[in-house]
Image (tube, rainbow, N blue to C red):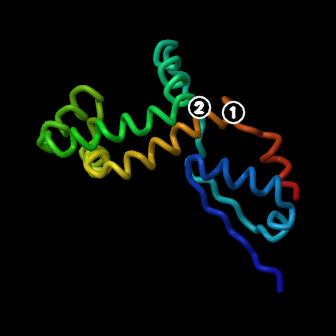
Amino acid sequence: STPNLIFISHSIGAHFIQCMLLRRPDILAKTRHILHLMPFFRFDPPPLQRLFLSTAAQSYKFTIPIVTSAVRALSSTLPRGWIDVYLEKVVGLDCTKGRQIALDIFMHPNMVKNHLVLGMQELRELPEHPNDVALRLIGTS
């Protein structure tokens, strides 16, 4: 019997699943459901921030090790409370639970590296607008 596949994705995973299904009609034929939870979409930052993010994403082979090393140094020397205050007052993360998650990630440099790798890949590879045609092609198969 043919397996019934169900894909549940989040963020850039939605893009990966969509690309795979377009490239692999054999897998698409076995797919019964696709559930994209908060698929990645581009935001429109101010021009200076856009330039910074674009440059960082294009130079990811340098950016990721530098940022990961900086996070490793900061997370091992700064008190957790200071980082929490920074996230709340400077970054504007006023949700206590959200700040707790961000702190937990920040305190583990490998998690920061994983987020940077995926985030920079999103900025380099994802189109600025959702690919509606791809979604329609997948939906009609």
- The quadrant in which residue 69 appears is top left
Lateral position of residue 34 relative to residue 59, left or right: right
Label 2 near label 1: C-beta < 8 Å?
yes
- The quadrant in which residue 91 appears is top left
Residue 28 position (above or below residue 38): below
Lateral position of residue 123 relative to residue 77, left or right: right
**Badge 2: residue crowd in 10 Å (few <14, some 14–19, many ≥20):** few
Residue 105 position (above or below residue 94): below
Which residue type carries mark 2?
Arg
**Residue that extends furthest to the bottom in the rendered view of this protein:** 1
Which residue type carries mark 1?
Pro
Q: Where is residue 52 in the image (x, y as percent from the top left)?
A: 47, 20
Lateral position of residue 6 relative to residue 47, left or right: right
Q: Residue 42 carries which label?
A: 2
**Badge 1: residue crowd in 10 Å (few <14, some 14–19, many ≥20):** few
Pick the quarter of the image with the C terminus: bottom right
Give the residue drawn at x 87%, y 55%. Answer: 140
Say which of 70 and 103 sits in front: 70
Lateral position of residue 1 relative to residue 101, left or right: right
Q: Where is residue 120 in the image (x, y as percent from the top left)?
A: 53, 37
Give the residue drawn at x 83%, y 47%. Answer: 136
- The quadrant in which residue 31 appears is bottom right
Query: Quick one: label 1 or label 2, which is nearer the N terminus?
Result: 2
Badge 1 element: loop
Give the residue drawn at x 17%, y 34%. Answer: 85
Residue 32 position (above or below residue 138): below
Q: Which mark is residue 127?
A: 1
